[in-house]
Amino acid sequence: MELKFIKLTACVGMAMLLGACSATTSLTAMQPDTTIYIKDAKGQDAPRTETLATTSFGHYEFKAIQPGQQPFYGVLPLKFNGGYLATDIILFAPAAFFNLREVFPYYQFDVAKQCLRYRKSEQDNWVEYVPTAAEKQRAETWFKQSGITPVTVTAKDNQ
């Protein structure tokens, strides 16, 4: 009986740890007919939500295209998750190499202004982010070397 309890507890613990290794985000665009590519994204109908793995050292390069505009390249800003760090220290310190940063819950792409907005909750104000020249170059290089399926995102939530 005790062995079954230990196995059940271990399975539940592993499921919780695996579930905590990803974060969901909502992707929208200011302009209609914007196509957004994101490294490691699955691609679905848009506007869409996307689940991306947490990371400590990785990045999510993006490319946003809107007819008549220059392509918009960059790297998604990620948020630090202190709760994961505390859990990693208490339960399994090497996990800190994999899950300290995650995507913000909301991103909005503005190809015309070449900026990205993000926020933690729907009630928060948007934070505007303009990728650096190095981030733009990094993303452009990555997309030239790989094939990502496009997903069209409609304009929504222009706050």
Image (cartoon, rainbow, N blue to C red):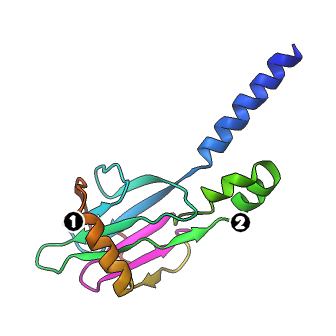
Please say if the residues under marks 1 and 2 sit with CB atoms less than 8 Å apart. no
Q: Is residue 93 magenta?
A: no
Whether residue 103 appears in this view of the structure is yes
State the separation of the CA atoms marked 1 and 2.
34 Å
Closer to the eye: label 1 or 2: 1
At which x and y percent is residue 153? 27, 62
The residue type indicated by label 1 comes to Lys
Identity of the residue furthest to the top in this view: 1
At 75% from the left edge and 30% from the top edge, which residue is drawn?
10
Q: Is 62 or 68 nearer to us in this picture?
A: 62
Considering only vertical position in the picture, is 76 above or below 15? below
Residue 107 is labelled as: none
Name the spot of residue 105 as percent of width and height, x first. Answer: 51, 63
> Which of the image's four quarters has the N terminus?
top right
The secondary element bearing badge 2 is classed as helix
Q: Residue 138: x, y in percent?
A: 34, 74
Q: Is residue 140 left or right of residue 24?
A: left
Which residue is at a point 57% across and 70% down the rendered structure image?
Answer: 79
User: Going by the picture, which residue comes out furthest to the right?
Assistant: 2
Work out whether residue 35 or residue 52 is closer to the camera in this orientation and state it: 52
Residue 158 percent location from the top left of the image: 35, 76
Quickly name the residue at label 1: 144
The image shows residue 11, relative to residue 89, as above or below, that is above
The amino acid sitting under disc 2 is: Gly
Q: Quadrant of residue 33?
A: bottom left
The residue wearing badge 2 is 82
Q: Nearer the viewer, residue 104 or 77?
A: 77
Q: Crowding near pointer 1: few (<14 within 10 Å), some, many (20+)?
A: few
Magenta-drawn segment? 105-122
Horizontal arrangement in the rendering, residue 74 relative to residue 82 (left or right): left
